[in-house]
Image (tube, rainbow, N blue to C red):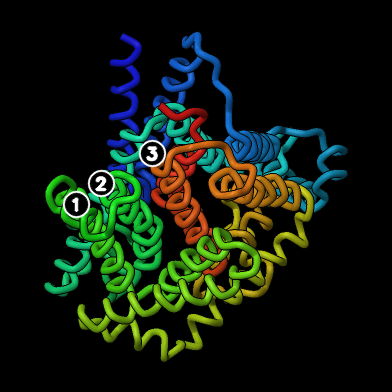
Amino acid sequence: MRNAVELVLFAALLAFLVWVPMPFGSASDASQAALILPALLIGCGAALLRAASKAPFVMTRPGRIWTTGGVLFVLVIALQLLPLPPGILALISPQSAVIWARATHVAALAGVNAGTNHPITIDPQHTALHFYRVLAYFAVFLASMILTRDTVRRLILAAVLGCVGIFEALYAVHEAALGRYAIWGWKNNLIFGRATGTFVNPNHFGHYAAIVLPMALYVSAYAWHTAAPAGATFGRRFVKLVERRFFPFAFGLLAALGCITAVLVSESRGAVLALIGGFALVGALVSDRKNAALRFVLIAAAVSAAVLAAILVLGRPGTVTRFETSQTSQVTARRDSVIAAIRIWAMFPLFGSGAGTYPDVALATAVTTGEIVPNHAHNDYSEILATTGALGFVVSLVPLLGGFGALMRNAVGPEGEPMSWRRRAFKLAALTSIAIAMMHALVDFNFFIPANPITLAAIAGAAVVAREL
């Protein structure tokens, strides 16, 4: 009975991962309940199943670090929602106290009693929504860590994400070929002339494909490795691959090609650079110190050559053109959005203005014009700093980097735990996905597009499972 329930929960997790990149799976306001509730239910179900088990649950070090960071970050946002007396609010967040005092005065003039206790956030409704969204991300991470606990399930997870990558690429190419940039009937009036897949923004579409690419390559690597016993010659392994593992190997390559195609048709410069940098960074970290720099350069050159070859084969001159020509207005808007985030942090240094309140405060910084108000800063780290303050920034970034380093040492370090080649390969693929996401976060706001952090959370959770079965 327990195994059946566990399989149902794992299937629900996979279905949820397929759902979130789809139209209205996570982007529209009307779909927030469908985004949050399934994740929380799956996470709670996995936790209860784990609690009912008599077997000990010993977490790996990277798992403990990321779990601790997730709990602390959720608590920081919860603290932003806690109503505080005026004296305490003025002490820990003076700017929030001033804003709430003015709002209370205006409400009193209108004959409305706004009360005396107010939270740190200047927009409790938006912060509450982001609180539940972050809780959903954390629930997906925990569910994946508990449920994706053996080689077969990790392979299934990677294959399912590869299927979504293929679908996204085919759908994007189909729409671009027909000149239709609508998402299943929903007209995109924000960005024209670039393929967006099932996303609103082509950059977020390209980012999703980029973080799925290592999972697709893992499927092919798994098929190649298991085709023949260890020590087999290249020729014998190739023959056995054709005989025994041809279809999984071909599927992985097809999914990888689909992901690269999706990145290119999105014409996202950030996704291309993050893809190259992510593979190069992990390759350098895997190498010994003497050869790390050389390995970084070689891997970056190899990935760049592969991307260039794909561009030539697919005939996508638009991607090259976007690298060669930089629109001053775009650069200025991106720069201003980051400057606005830094100024917001200066106004709310310790606890931030409240998760999800960036567009509410951006105009007050006098950086952006009234014509276009950015919804997010084009740098995830600066927006986290602005909206959750120094406290939220530290409890999110330090565990993120600490867990990344711990997972790398766990996988390839001299004191890493004994594990199979297949588990180590999955961890390296997951590290590459995480590295790509961290690099792209420097120039975009992908952490605030639910499909991307949810997918990344599932990959990270599967990489830090407690034991191998």
Label placed on residue 228: 2
Is residue 213 toward the left or the right of residue 62 in the image?
left
Give SS at disc 3.
helix
Q: Quadrant of residue 325 in the image?
A: bottom left
Label placed on residue 35: 3
Label placed on residue 241: 1
Q: Earlier in the sequence, mark 3 or mark 2?
A: 3
Q: Can you give x and y, in whole percent of width and height, for residue 271 in the image?
A: 42, 69
Question: Circle 1: is it few (<14), some (14-19), or many (20+) Cα within 10 Å?
Answer: many
Vertical placement of 66 versus 412: above or below?
A: above
Q: Amino acid at mark 3?
A: Leu
Of residues 293 and 139, the one drawn nearer to the viewer in this rendering:
293
Q: Can you give x and y, in whole percent of width and height, for residue 407 in the image?
A: 57, 45
Residue ID at (62%, 59%): 381
Q: Earlier in the sequence, mark 1 or mark 2?
A: 2
Give SS at disc 2.
loop
